Image (cartoon, helix red, strand yellow):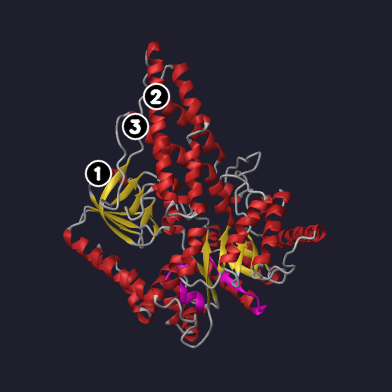
Amino acid sequence: MGYFLRGIPISRGIAIGRVILRHDLMKNIRYTRIEAERVMEEVEAYQRALEAIRQETLLMRQQAQQRLSDKNTSVLDFHYNLIQEDFFQKDVVKRIQTDYYNALSALHYELSQLKKRFEELQSDYFQARFLDIKELANRIAHNLQGGVLERPSKDNPAIIVAEEISSAEVLHLEQGAVLGIATETGSTTSHAAIIAESLEIPAVFGIKDLFNFIKKDDIMIVDGYKGVVIINPDEATINTYHELQKNYKAQEEANFNLINLPSRTTDEVGITLMANVSNSMELNIAMRHGAEGIGLLRSEMIFIQNQRMMNENEQFDLYREFLILFAGKPVTIRTLDLGGDKFLANPVQEANPFLGWRSIRIFLKEKELFKQQLRAIMRSSVFNDNVRILIPMISSLSEVRQVKEIIQECISDLKREGRPFNYRIPLGIMIEIPSAALMASTLIKEVDFFSIGTNDLVQYTLAADRGNPNVSEYYQPLNPGVLALIRLTIRAANANKKPVSVCGEMARDPLYVRLLLGMGLRIFSVNPAYLPLVKSILLKSSVQQTKELWNTVKKLTTHEEIQQVLREDLKKHCPEIYDSYFYEDEVR
């Protein structure tokens, strides 16, 4: 049936079609020197290629502006502006002139030097920036070699296969032209992943040695639900996946028809379904899918898209847009969840940035930057009385108290300036560090609500990087230790009659929804595309049933045992959803 390869599921859906390969042309360039009299000729050839790519990028940006929101086209603006930077305009030319490299060699040399500098910073932000620069360099290299980069179109759609892909390239692709995306590297948190999911393009990243198995015009199946790709499948497998596509479409249409129904269990317990959003595109999907509010606005993604620290007034204008669109509904704005290497004047180099100076740890030190964001959120509250502030990466009570002191300073400043704002904006914290979960009964007395970030809670509890395929087997959301921390947090919030939500990926996984309900969760916050699916499961569930499920699960001692119980439970109570998600054995 062809090659069956596993990766990281990024964007759900199934794609079947021919592939277009995106080779990294800058990977295997051999350095070539030229004679002095050819320098000007080589510089001119490079500049012609650069101008061709500039014009191509300008055209793609103009075409994309017709179908994307302003926030997403800002990524394309950044991509276009990259071409004007010294790296492309001066550094490569200087390398040709001083070292007598040909244009390809000079471009490769400068790119390799830039990569070394960015790698030293160990930053997701700079990795994303380098990826955009490298994508432009590859397009210039392709032009220098006389090639025209093949792009899929609506009339001739295809699956993009690449070693890695930038967010700007995903946005450049014509709507309806890309059937799916498969890459050798990448993670669920990359900008390209978030945008692929927003555009509802089936995608699987992190497929080890993918290019060893594939060639131009091969046929591929991309299964974004399971995180697998099948290269040159046999006819029986293709037919099976066509049937799965058909079933998925029917199931998703059925789920979508439920969005206007009240969110209640079969025993009449009300549930709140909210959305996690990063940009205006996801906000619009959330509205279409009946979100009852925004449970998580990832403010840092908007900063990253703009490639700079935004001032208070710019942030005010931004939050106002989100709050007006969801007027009358809760909007939870998470303060910047950034590493110390993003946007600050003196980037910090750390051996392990995920356990380092990041998120609230930065902004308790960089107080003026923190106050700018808090003031912008507070000022924007006049457009929606239901705005809420969420603080990430809390690990201790003292951090919460420091945050509250800074908020009081902002309140005093705004009062003195005579600026209108809501004086009683609820303050919540992310429970994503084990110490916070263990102290939940103490922390809940200091704040107004909890939001459980299961993605980080799992990786911090189990010491397993969720984006690293080498340790993926250790990333186990159903580990009994993880479930105990989640239950501890939910119980502490419920005992104090304060809201608690789950905003991590567990809240959207059909296998975990009924379990979380049985553990006492009543607020789910998920990617907007998953709202109909989660609602469909909850409408078929009773609290009494799911409590019994939790009572069974909490006695088990391994994640394998728990997973089996949850699969059997989903098959019994939601058979059509089970059949949609657990078909792997049938197609192997």
For disc 2, the neighbor class at 10 Å (few under 14, some 14 to 19, many from 20) is many
For disc 1, the neighbor class at 10 Å (few under 14, some 14 to 19, many from 20) is some
Q: Earlier in the sequence, mark 1 or mark 3?
A: 3
Mark 1 belongs to which amino acid? Lys
Q: Nearer the viewer, mark 3 or mark 2?
A: 3
Observer-nearest residue: 567 or 343?
343
Observer-nearest residue: 155 or 355?
155
Q: Earlier in the sequence, mark 1 or mark 2?
A: 2
Q: Quadrant of the N terminus?
A: bottom left
Label 1 sits on a secondary structure element that is: loop
Mark 3 belongs to which amino acid? Asn
Q: Answer whether residue 477 is visible to the viewer in this image.
A: no
The residue that appears at 41% across and 75% down in the rendered structure is 566
Q: On the rendered structure, is 547 left or right of 335?
A: left
Residue tagged 3: 143
Q: On the rendered structure, is 403 left or right of 582?
A: right
Residue tagged 2: 103
Q: Answer whether residue 333 is visible to the viewer in this image.
A: yes
